[in-house]
Image: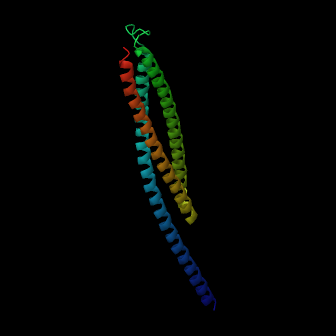
C-alpha cells in the first residue's frame, strides 16, 4: 500500500513537472518572439536615427552657408556713384526695396530658427522614446503579455513622432527654399545699387 501511495505521489509530481516545463517552453518561445520583434524594431529605429542625424548635420551646414550669404549681403553698402539725391527717384526706390528685403530677411530668419528649434525638440523626444523602448526591450524576457501592449503603444508614439518629424522636415526644407529664393532676389536688388 505504501508503494502505491508513493507511486501516485510520483505520478502527480511528474505530471506537475511536465506541465511546468510545457508552460516554461511556451513562455520562452513567446519571449523570444517578442525579443526578435523588438530587436528588429530597434535596428530599424537605429537606421532611422542615423539618417536623421545625417539630415540634421546637412541642415546645420546649409544653415551656416545661408548665414554666411546673409552676412555678405548685409555687409554690402551702396557705392558712392549712386547719389541719394537722384532726380529720377531711383535711389529712394532702392532704399525702399532694400528695407523691404531686410524686413523679409529678418522674418525668414526668425521662421527658420523657430523651425530648427522645433525640429531639434522633436528629435530629442524621438530619441527619448527610443531609449525607453530599448529599456523595455531589455526587460522583455521577464515580462508577460502586458509588455507587448506597452511596446505597441510605444511604436504608435514613435510612428506619430516620425510623421511629425517628416512634417517638420518638409517645413524646414520649405523655409530653406524660401530663404534661398530671398537671397537670389536680394542679389538682384542689391546688384542694381552698386
* Residue lying furthest bottom: 1
**Which of the image's four quarters has the N terminus?**
bottom right
Taking depth in this image into account, of 51 and 31 the one nearest to the observer is 51
Is 139 above or below relative to 76?
below
Taking depth in this image into account, of 29 and 161 the one nearest to the observer is 161
**Which of the image's four quarters has the C terminus?**
top left
Spot occupied by residue 12 in the image (x, y as percentages of width and height):
59, 83
* Residue lying furthest front: 88
Quadrant of the rendered image containing residue 180: top left
Image side of residue 81 versus residue 152, left or right: left
Taking depth in this image into account, of 176 and 4 the one nearest to the observer is 176
- Number of labelled discs? 0
Image side of residue 129 versus residue 2, left or right: left
Is 96 above or below relative to 18?
above
Spot occupied by residue 45 in the image (x, y as percentages of width and height):
45, 50
Spot occupied by residue 5 in the image (x, y as percentages of width and height):
63, 88
Residue at x-position 53% and y-position 58%: 151
Coloring basis for residues: rainbow
Residue at x-position 50% and y-position 30%: 107
Residue at x-position 42% and y-position 23%: 68
Spot occupied by residue 22 in the image (x, y as percentages of width and height):
51, 74
Image side of residue 129 versus residue 1, left or right: left
Is 9 above or below relative to 161?
below
Quadrant of the rendered image containing residue 8: bottom right
Is 94 above or below relative to 65?
above
Amino acid at each position: 500500500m505504501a508503494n502505491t501511495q508513493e507511486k501516485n505521489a510520483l505520478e502527480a509530481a511528474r505530471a506537475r513537472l511536465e506541465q511546468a516545463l510545457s508552460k516554461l517552453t511556451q513562455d520562452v518561445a513567446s519571449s523570444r518572439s517578442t525579443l526578435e520583434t523588438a530587436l528588429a524594431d530597434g535596428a530599424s529605429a537605429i537606421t532611422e536615427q542615423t539618417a536623421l542625424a545625417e539630415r540634421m548635420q546637412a541642415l546645420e551646414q546649409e544653415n551656416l552657408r545661408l548665414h554666411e550669404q546673409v552676412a555678405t549681403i548685409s555687409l554690402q553698402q551702396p557705392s558712392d556713384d549712386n547719389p541719394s539725391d537722384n532726380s529720377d527717384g531711383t535711389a529712394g526706390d532702392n532704399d525702399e526695396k532694400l528695407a523691404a528685403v531686410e524686413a523679409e530677411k529678418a522674418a525668414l530668419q526668425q521662421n527658420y530658427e523657430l523651425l530648427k528649434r522645433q525640429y531639434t525638440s522633436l528629435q530629442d523626444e524621438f530619441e527619448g522614446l527610443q531609449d525607453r523602448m530599448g529599456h523595455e526591450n531589455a526587460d522583455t524576457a521577464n515580462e508577460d503579455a502586458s509588455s507587448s501592449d506597452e511596446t505597441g503603444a510605444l511604436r504608435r508614439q514613435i510612428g506619430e513622432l516620425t510623421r511629425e518629424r517628416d512634417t517638420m522636415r518638409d517645413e524646414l526644407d520649405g523655409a530653406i527654399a524660401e530663404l534661398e529664393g530671398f537671397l537670389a532676389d536680394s542679389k538682384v536688388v542689391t546688384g542694381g545699387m552698386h
